[in-house]
Image: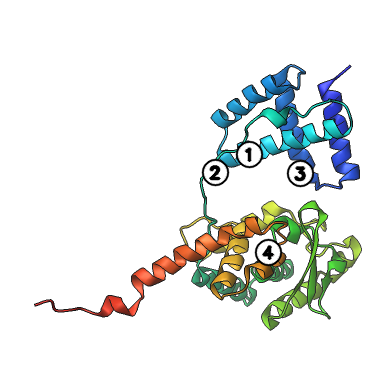
């Protein structure tokens, strides 16, 4: 007899142990499927799904609704593959809809420069205690790495000690779906910042086998990085809201403006599909429009029609 909650458990186990999906992805699937279970009263059929999808569009933004529908589709595919149901109900449900284009928010290069300069100047303050000086070295290393690699904050915080090879100047990053990518660090200032941080935290790094360590000698949290960035943003007197992920957006957009091939940027970001990376071409085109509107030499030419 079909038991929806039991089948959900089977699907989540399949995602964890067979597909080796990221912990965060499995958690999101669990939440999404629990919401459907509560709505559907244990049934998994076309009628329930159509009504639920309609409710999703009413309650959530398009991107969130699309993600939750994708979860249900994956679950349905699993049920068919395991011969738990005979027919995929999504085969007769139209789920395509147009998402509004939301351009990624970037940080102006001048603001990134000010944030870095502020952190480096903090390092020179003679009044700070020993551990505070060590924290500043960690701040600098994280800021430099976020901008140098375009890595997600979660990828930075979960870096293993053996994933950072300062001798060969490479960082091995494990992204979504446990996809691995290796990024070279070629800027000498970034390398120096990472090396100085490593020397300051060497004992904890080797003991915990993690690269970024907090005050309690454990893994540095993503929230700690957010607070750290806000601290420097406040100190430079910038009014805008800046997040770690905006460094990733800025990394991609600025490379695109330097005419780096989008396929290279895709690999650097760890995107499985070029479609995901192409969002940055829209940002670049917006920048191009601004340049042509404000800086084109034709704007300085005045023609006397008289």
Q: Do the residues labelled 2 and 4 touch (CB within 8 Å)?
A: no
Count residues near mark 1 (Cα–Cα under 10 Å), then give few for <14, some for 14-19, many for 20+. Answer: some
Q: Quadrant of residue 10?
A: top right
Residue 174: x and y in percent read 80, 59
Task: Name the residue located 67 percent from the left edge and 71 percent from the top edge.
Answer: 148
The quarter of the picture where the C terminus appears is bottom left
Going from the N terminus, do you reach mark 1 or mark 2 first? 1
Disc 3 element: helix
Residue 226: x and y in percent read 63, 55
Pointer 2: what residue?
Answer: 99
Q: Single out the mark in the foreground, 3 or 1.
A: 1
Dot label at residue 266: 4
Going from the N terminus, do you reach mark 2 or mark 4 first? 2
Pointer 3: what residue?
Answer: 25
Pointer 1: what residue?
Answer: 66
Going from the N terminus, do you reach mark 4 or mark 3 first? 3
Q: Do the residues labelled 1 and 2 touch (CB within 8 Å)?
A: yes
């Amino acid at each position: 007899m079909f038991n929806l909650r039991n089948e959900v458990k089977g699907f989540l186990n399949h995602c964890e142990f067979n597909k080796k999906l990221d912990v965060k992805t499995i958690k999101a699937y669990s939440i999404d499927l629990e919401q459907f279970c509560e709505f559907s009263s244990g049934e998994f059929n076309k009628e329930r799904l159509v009504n639920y999808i309609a409710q999703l569009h009413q309650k959530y933004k398009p991107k969130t609704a699309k993600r939750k529908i994708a979860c249900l589709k994956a679950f349905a595919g699993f049920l068919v593959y395991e011969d738990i149901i005979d027919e995929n109900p999504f085969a007769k449900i139209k789920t395509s809809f147009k998402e509004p284009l939301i351009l990624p928010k970037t940080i102006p290069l001048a603001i990134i420069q000010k944030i870095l300069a502020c952190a480096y100047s903090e390092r020179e303050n003679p009044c700070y205690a020993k551990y505070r000086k060590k924290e500043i070295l960690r701040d600098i290393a994280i800021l430099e790495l976020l901008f140098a690699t375009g890595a997600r904050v979660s990828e930075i915080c979960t870096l293993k000690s053996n994933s950072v090879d300062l001798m060969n100047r490479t960082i091995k990053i494990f992204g979504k779906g446990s996809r691995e990518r290796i990024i070279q660090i070629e800027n000498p200032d970034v390398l120096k910042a990472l090396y100085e941080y490593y020397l300051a935290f060497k004992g904890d790094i080797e003991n915990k086998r993690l690269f970024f360590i907090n005050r309690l000698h454990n893994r540095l949290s993503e929230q700690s990085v957010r607070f750290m960035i806000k601290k420097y943003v406040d100190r430079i007197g910038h009014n805008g809201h800046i997040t770690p992920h905006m460094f990733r957006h800025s990394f991609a957009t600025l490379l695109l403006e330097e005419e780096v091939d989008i396929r290279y940027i895709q690999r650097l970001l760890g995107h499985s599909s070029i479609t995901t990376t192409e969002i940055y071409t829209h940002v670049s085109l917006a920048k191009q429009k601004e340049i042509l509107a404000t800086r084109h030499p034709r704007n300085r030419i005045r023609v006397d029609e008289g």
